[in-house]
Image (cartoon, rainbow, N blue to C red):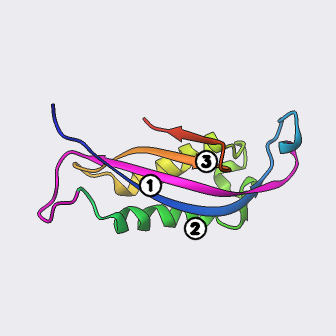
Amino acid sequence: MAQTFILKTLLDFAAAHTLKGYPGDCAKMHGHNWKIEVQVSGTQLNEIGMVIDFKEIKRHAKAVIKELDHSYLNDHPHFKDLNPTAENIAVYIFKQVESVISSPNVKMHSITVWENDRNCVTYSE
């Protein structure tokens, strides 16, 4: 069986949102201190023994997170017609990071979005 390495780095941001059509309090504007787990995978180590430098993963993920941080997510162009649920946020971050980090040896593995200490969603393809 081939070896696989899964690397994880953690980031966070603060943002507010409303959930259109939600039958409860989340239909009102509210905020979260979101935690994001970015996981990438690879099967080969480079000449210094890494799949990819954690700093590079963070750099790419931070660029995506920066546009969401301290914002009202419903105003973000991606969420104009899409509810900014934890699920949709996970897909968005996954796709954005994937577009810049993927290479022959590095692939996006998953994104986990925590909206609080008890609730999260993990997205992968």
For disc 2, the neighbor class at 10 Å (few under 14, some 14 to 19, many from 20) is few
Give x and y (percent) for residue 115: 67, 49
- Whole-number angstrom distance, CA of label 1 to CA of label 2: 12 Å
* Disc 1 from disc 3: Cα separation: 12 Å
Image coordinates of residue 30 in percent, x first then y, are 82, 54
- Which residues, given as a range, are shown in magenta? 27-50
* Cβ atoms under marks 1 and 3 closer than 8 Å: no
SS under mark 1: helix
Q: Where 11 falls versus 19 (above or below)?
A: below
Residue sitting at x 53%, y 51%: 93
Residue hosting label 3:
89
The image quadrant where one finds the N terminus is: top left
- Secondary structure beneath label 2: helix
Q: Nearer the viewer, residue 88 or 50?
A: 50
Q: Amino acid at mark 2?
A: Lys
Badge 3 amino acid: Ile
Instruction: Point out which mark residue 97 bears.
Output: 1
Q: CA distance from mark 2 to mark 3?
A: 13 Å
Q: Earlier in the sequence, mark 2 or mark 3?
A: 2
The amino acid type, in three-letter code, at marker 1 is: Val
> Any magenta on residue 125?
no
Count of numbered marks: 3
**Quarter of the image with the C terminus in it:** top left
